Image (tube, rainbow, N blue to C red):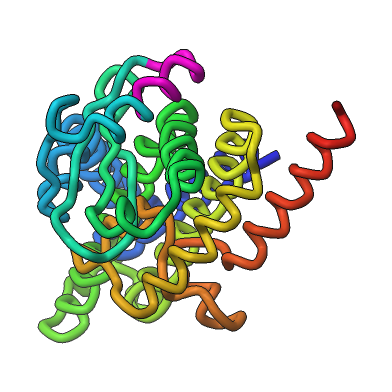
Amino acid sequence: MNQIKTAALLGLLSALLITVSYWVIGGTGGAIIGIGLAAAMNLGSWFYSDKIALAAYGAVPVTANQAPGLYTMVERLSQRANLPMPGVYMIPTPSANAFATGRDPEHAAVAVTEGIMNMLSEEELEGVIAHELTHINNRDTLTQAVAATVAGAISWLAQMASYSMWFGGRDDRNGPNPVGLLLTIILAPVAASVIQLAISRTREFSADAGAARLTGNPRALARALQRLESGARQMPLNGNPAFAPLLIVNSSAGDWFRSLFSTHPTTEARIENLMKMEQELLNSD
């Protein structure tokens, strides 16, 4: 069900891009130009999103000698998940967080902060690593890169529309639709962000479930999420907001309005799902 929902949201985001292109540039040609721009941006993000995300948070690669416990844990869980060994990175900050990136399992990386290493117990950290590996296995990192790129293209077109309104556009019938321009400026960036973040929230539930199955210990991940959310509110991980959906927790979750614009589901909802999975695992034994 989550995969169907993600595909539907990506389709909706793409449809919004085509519509915005049609309104801003004008006519069928505008839609074609918008699609071409998005395709070029998607290709770039497909190849370079991992390097950009790692650089955005100042992540540095670590070897088995430098971080033996972490490296061994990632290696063990990767083997259990039948995944190639990803690159292992450390982010030198006391903030507690983690993320995975890469266009596919063969070109993936897992990054954790020094803060998360100090905060969590071994089984809690194992749950976090399993969560990130599930993102890699589900190719969520690519999905999120595509969503971010398309949403960025929509925002860029909305900015073009704003310039057109201020400095004047063509008056012929093939020019931009004035009503479409106004709607684009006001609504398109917000709609694109809401759809992009909904995709991210959907993938987080799937990754939590995959981690619970991989470790057989849903409660450990639930405890980790609770502690990480508390830590993130006190000491958030600074970086490019475009990459916030990659992180395992984000401190923006709260009431309904803030949750609409949050990169993650509420921690309460995630813990509730994990506790249901724990009960299912107990009943299956």
Name the residue at 72% across, 59% down.
272
The answer to whether any part of residue 165 appears in the image is yes
Name the residue at 47% across, 13% down.
82
Tell me where residue 247 appears, x and y as whole percent.
Answer: 36, 54
Relative to the observer, which residue lies in front, 167 or 208? 208
Name the residue at 58% across, 67% down.
266
Relative to the observer, which residue lies in front, 122 or 188? 122
- Asked if residue 138 lies left or right of residue 5, the reply is left
Q: Is residue 51 magenta-colored?
A: no
Tell me where residue 73 appears, x and y as whole percent.
Answer: 37, 29
Magenta segment: 74-83
Image vertical order of residue 146 relative to residue 251, above or below: above
Q: Is residue 80 magenta-colored?
A: yes
Find residue 44 and report its image quarter: top left
Q: Which residue is situated farthest in the right direction here?
A: 283
Relative to the observer, which residue lies in front, 12 or 143? 143
Find residue 37 and report its image quarter: top left
Q: Quadrant of the N terminus?
A: top right
Q: Quadrant of the C terminus?
A: top right
Name the residue at 45% across, 73% down.
230
